[in-house]
Image (tube, rainbow, N blue to C red):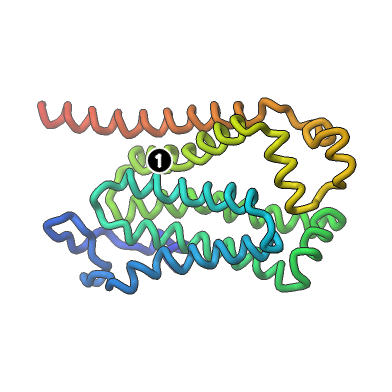
Amino acid sequence: MDRGTRPWRLGPVDVVDRAGLAGTPDGGAPGRVDRVLVWALPAVVLVLSRLAYTWFDAPVHLALTLGAWALFALTARALVGRRDGFWLWSAVGGVALVRSVLLLAVLAWRGPGRYWFGFWTVPVQRAAYVTVAFALFCWLFVATFAVLRARYGLTRRRAAGVVAVAAGAPLVVGGVVVAGVGLETTLTAWNDQLALLPWGLHRILGICVYLGIPTALPTWIAVGGAVVVAGGALLLVRRTRDRAASSRG
C-alpha cells in the first residue's frame, strides 16, 4: 500500500538483468510470493469489498467496476512491455487497497443498507464521502504516472501517454458494451439487483426518462474514451519518432 500512497519515494531502477527486469531499490529482487501477493491481495480485497457493498447480489455493478480496474491495470502493464510489472502492480494495487479501505470503513458502520440510506438522505456526509472517493479515484492516475517516471524511467510525455491510453480503454470498452446492450436495459438490470430506485416507477417510466439520462450517453463516453486513447497514443508515437530521428542524426 505504501507504494500506492507514496510512489515518489521509489528510486530509479538500480538493478536490471539481461531480460530487462528491474530489481528493488536496495538491489534485491522481489520474491515469488511478493510477485503474487502484490496483485492478488488487492484483487481479492477489491472483489470482496464490492460484493459486500452490493449485498453479494449485483453482478452487473461488479462487472462494470472490476472490469474498469482490470482494463486500466492490464492496459498499463501491456504498455510497459517486457519490463518487470511488479512496481506497476504495487502502485495500482496500493491505490485499490486505499480505495477499498475507505469503502469498508463506511460499510463497517451498519452495512450497505445504512450506507445507501445515508448516501441518499444525508447530503453533508454524501458530499464528504464523494469528495474523498473522487480524490482517491484521481490519485490512481497520479500514482501510476509517478511509478512510471520513478521506477521505469519513462519521460513525462511517455508516462502521460501510458496513463492516458490506460484510462481511456475502460471508457471505450464500457461505452461500447453498454451501448450495444442498451442503456435502459443495463440500468434496469443494475437497479433490479441493487433496488435503489422504486421498482414500479422505473419500470413504468424507464430509468432514463425518470432520471433524465440521455440514451446516447454510452456512445458519448466511448467517443470521449477514444479521444483520450488517441491522445495518449500520439504522445507515445511522437516519442518513438523523436528517438528514431535523434539516432539517425
Q: Residue 131, position in %: x, y? A: 68, 53
Tally of marks: 1
- Residue 5 is at least partly visible in this image: no
Q: Residue at x 83, y 60 (%)?
A: 117
Q: Is 4 or 181 nearer to us in this picture?
A: 181
Q: Residue 216, position in %: x, y? A: 67, 25
Q: Residue at x 45, y 54 (%)?
A: 143
Please, is residue 39 above or below residue 227 in the view? Answer: below
Instruction: Please tell me whether mark 1 sits on a helix, a strand or a loop.
Output: helix
Which quarter of the rendered picture does the C terminus lie within?
top left
Q: Is 2 or 21 nearer to us in this picture?
A: 21
- Residue 213 is at least partly visible in this image: yes
Indicate the quadrant where residue 245 lies: top left
Q: Residue at x 71, y 27 (%)?
A: 215
In the picture of the structure, the residue carrying the numbered disc 1 is 160
Left or right of 41, for residue 175: right
Q: Is 132 or 182 nearer to us in this picture?
A: 182
Indicate the quadrant where residue 188 lies: top right
Please, is residue 192 above or below residue 97 in the view? Answer: above
Indicate the quadrant where residue 45 lies: bottom right
Amino acid found under the numbered disc labelled 1: Ala
Left or right of 133, for residue 162: left
Left or right of 8, for residue 5: right
